[in-house]
Image (cartoon, rainbow, N blue to C red):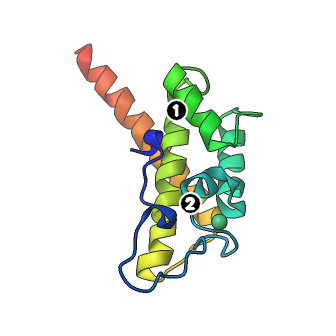
Amino acid sequence: MFENGRLPTQDRLHWKHDPPDMKCPLCKNFMDSHDHLFFLCTFSLEVWRTIKHDTCLYGFDERWENIRAALIQGRGPWKKEQRLALQASVYCIWRERNRRLFANRSNDAIFVIKEIREVVLQRMAWMTFEGACSYG
Ligand SMILES: [Zn+2]
């Protein structure tokens, strides 16, 4: 879903009554939009930069339209763990946004980075396990 730029950020919703607070729940500064969330937001940018460093994606793009174009055209982070890291980053940042918006709980960037690392490790382990089975 995220590859299409269609996650329902607040700029895409139409409100029948009073509009809610449209500020980004992560940095509380800018309008909540897909492009802002991935990765112009100072919070998500901090997370993404750390994950990029983790997975040797130095210099890889921080603008969502370019990341998306790279994904569609098959350019960009395309070692398995790099693709996983990108997907996990989007997933965990999105989840943190929703926690703040709907559950009134918030975690810092360090926590989200830890979550992303765990998701990547789990999925890598699972893929290795599946690979081992297919040779059995
Ligand atoms: Zn923000």
Q: CA distance from mark 2 to mark 1?
A: 23 Å
Indicate yes or no: mark 1 CB to ligand 1 under 8 Å: no
Q: Is residue 80 visible?
A: yes
Q: Residue at x 60, y 52 (%)?
A: 35
> Considering the numbered disc 1 on the image, is that residue within a helix, a strand or a loop?
helix
Which of marks 1 and 2 precedes in the sequence?
A: 2
Q: Is residue 82 visible?
A: no
The residue tagged 1 is 83
Left or right of 39, for residue 123:
left
Where in the figure is residue 51, as x and y percent of width and height? 65, 45
Q: Residue at x 44, y 35 (%)?
A: 124
Left or right of 10, for residue 38:
right
Q: What amino acid is found at the position of numbered circle 1 in the picture?
A: Arg
Where in the figure is residue 129, as x and y percent of width and height? 33, 29
Q: Residue at x 72, y 61 (%)?
A: 42
The residue tagged 2 is 33
Which is more foreground, mark 2 or mark 1? 2
Left or right of 105, for residue 59:
right
Which residue is the extreme one toward the top? 135
Numbered circles on residues, count: 2
Which residue is the extreme one toward the bottom? 18
Q: What amino acid is found at the position of numbered circle 2 in the picture?
A: Ser
Residue 36, disc:
none
Where in the figure is residue 60, as x and y percent of width and height? 71, 33
Where in the figure is residue 103, as x and y percent of width and height? 41, 80
Q: Is residue 33 above or below residue 133?
A: below
Residue 62 found in image quarter: top right
Residue 106 found in image quarter: bottom right
Q: Depth check: give the residue in front, 87 or 128.
A: 87
